[in-house]
Image (cartoon, rainbow, N blue to C red):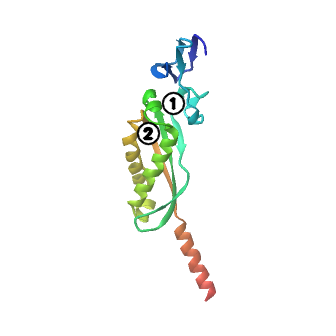
């Protein structure tokens, strides 16, 4: 990257001077001082919300947490995951206030899901999924402001295998008699 640099539309590039954050290059034709200024790279983000490991994409992104096993308040095992829609509002906070932003969003989504499922009964989870979505979004939104991102949507997916197992047990027991 030389003296003149073109930043694509809806992207920003963070510039560091002697290893310390200096400024943000917005979209358009920009000037960067060679040897004095360097571009902040984001290899740890693994291509999520960035292009070529240094251009931050300001559009909306979607992350999915892995499906995990949780216990409800009435001690029933459910499998759940959450999809989190988000976008960067402050590029400096998004890069410098947290180590690896996409990984942290997934972690916070899983933590919020575990906490909220543990506070609800199975009937509440299955009957009012929007309530669970709102509870998870509330927990994630508190922290996301400090990270320079905005949560745009939350969608939870819950599957209860316990009911199927109980039905199968009853079927097996009745067949044995």
> Which quarter of the rendering shows the N terminus?
top right
State the residue at coordinates (39%, 53%): 131
Q: Residues within 10 Å of mark 2 (few under 14, many from 20)?
A: many
Element assignment for label 2: strand
State the residue at coordinates (44%, 27%): 92
Q: Position of residue 44 (x, y in %)?
A: 57, 36
Rendered position, 29 above or below 119: above
* Displayed quadrant of residue 125: bottom left
* Displayed quadrant of residue 42: top right
Q: Position of residue 45 (x, y in %)?
A: 56, 35
State the residue at coordinates (53%, 28%): 57
Viewer can see residue 88: no
Farthest residue in the front direction? 18
Q: Which residue is mark 2?
A: 151
Q: Position of residue 164 (x, y in %)?
A: 56, 70
Farthest residue in the bottom direction? 177
Q: Which residue is mark 1?
A: 59
Rendered position, 146 above or below 64: above
């Amino acid at each position: 990257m030389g003296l003149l640099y073109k930043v694509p539309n809806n992207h920003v590039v963070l510039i560091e001077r002697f290893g310390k954050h200096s400024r943000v290059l917005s979209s358009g034709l920009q000037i960067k001082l060679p040897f004095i200024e360097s571009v902040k790279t984001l290899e740890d983000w693994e291509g999520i919300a960035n292009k070529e490991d240094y251009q931050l994409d300001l559009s909306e992104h979607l992350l999915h947490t892995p499906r995990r096993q949780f216990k409800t308040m009435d001690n029933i095992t459910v499998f759940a995951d959450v999809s989190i829609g988000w976008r960067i509002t402050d590029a400096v906070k998004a890069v410098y206030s947290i180590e690896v932003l996409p990984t942290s969003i997934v972690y916070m989504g899983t933590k919020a899901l575990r906490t909220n499922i543990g506070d609800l009964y199975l009937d509440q989870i299955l009957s009012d999924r929007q309530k669970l979505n709102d509870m998870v979004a509330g927990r994630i939104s508190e922290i996301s402001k400090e990270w320079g991102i905005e949560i745009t949507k939350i969608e939870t997916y819950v599957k209860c295998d316990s009911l199927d197992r109980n039905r199968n047990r009853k079927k097996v027991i009745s067949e044995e008699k």
